[in-house]
Image (tube, helix red, strand yellow):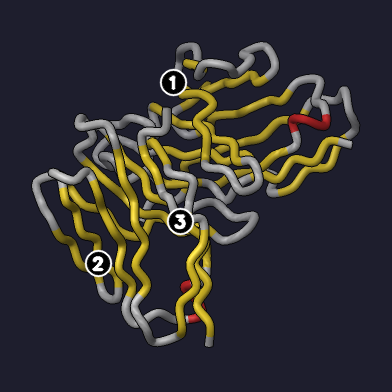
Amino acid sequence: GAVVSQHPSRVICKSGTSVKIECRSLDFQATTMFWYRQFPKKSLMLMATSNEGSKATYEQGVEKDKFLINHASLTLSTLTVTSAHPEDSSFYICSAGGAGQNEKLFFGSGTQLSVL
Amino acid sequence: DQQVKQNSPSLSVQEGRISILNCDYTNSMFDYFLWYKKYPAEGPTFLISISSIKDKNEDGRFTVFLNKSAKHLSLHIVPSQPGDSAVYFCAASVGGNTPLVFGKGTRLSVIA
């Protein structure tokens, strides 16, 4: 089946630094990728929709200047958490569904971000 | 406003018995439903799905039932195995390559 690779799997950083998370579709082209965030004991919350070659679409309440999304190619989307703070600590997951994959999105393995 | 609801945060089942996980939705535009399984610190993995034109889909030990009139679906796992212990997310889609709407998940514990 289709594979989505997410890197890194775990990041510990100091408050104020920026962290970049990569999401790659390995065997299909993904014109659209989605970024989710999960808080403990909460659902997966959609943060933004990343569109190849255009600006990302952010969900209400998500700061676009804090969570920078770049989808420069059909196989790579990046999420950069800028000037991270402890409240940004969370589990971030990307997903992608290429042409023909229909609703069956494939998920990356997630990135656990801990901001000290 | 939660469009996909999983009202049971946790469920414990004995090994070999049936696990039934429930999910309710409010948006009548949803036409595709999926179940994902998630282990701690890992991304969700796809388990089984069902289109709104069907009322049942079976794949091995997993069966999903859809009751459109009640806006309810359920996932049956039989027989349950300890390796099934995970958080199960119900998700729904309005179709096409659109983001999924997830429920809050149900933590299943299968006791040996």
Examine the rendered structure and indicate whether residue A112 appears above or below residue B87. above
Does residue B100 appear in the picture of this structure? Answer: yes
Q: Residue furthest left?
A: B53
Residue flagged by tag 3: what amino acid is it?
Answer: Ser
Mark 1 touches mark 2? (CB < 8 Å): no
Q: Which residue is mark 3?
A: B8
Looking at the rendered image, the disc whose residue lies closer to the viewer, 2 or 3, is: 3
Q: Position of residue B99 (x, y in %)?
A: 38, 32
Q: Gap between marks 1 and 2, in whole Å? A: 34 Å
Looking at the rendering, which quadrant does residue B26 occupy? Answer: top left
The residue to which callout 1 is attached is A51
Q: Mark 2 and mark 3: span between their CA atoms? A: 19 Å
Q: Viewer-proximal residue, B70 or B52?
A: B70
User: On the rendered structure, is A57 left or right of A88?
Assistant: left
- Callout 3 environment at 10 Å: few (<14), some (14 to 19), or many (20+)? some
Q: Earlier in the sequence, mark 2 or mark 3?
A: 3
> Does residue A29 appear in this view?
no
Residue of label 2:
B63
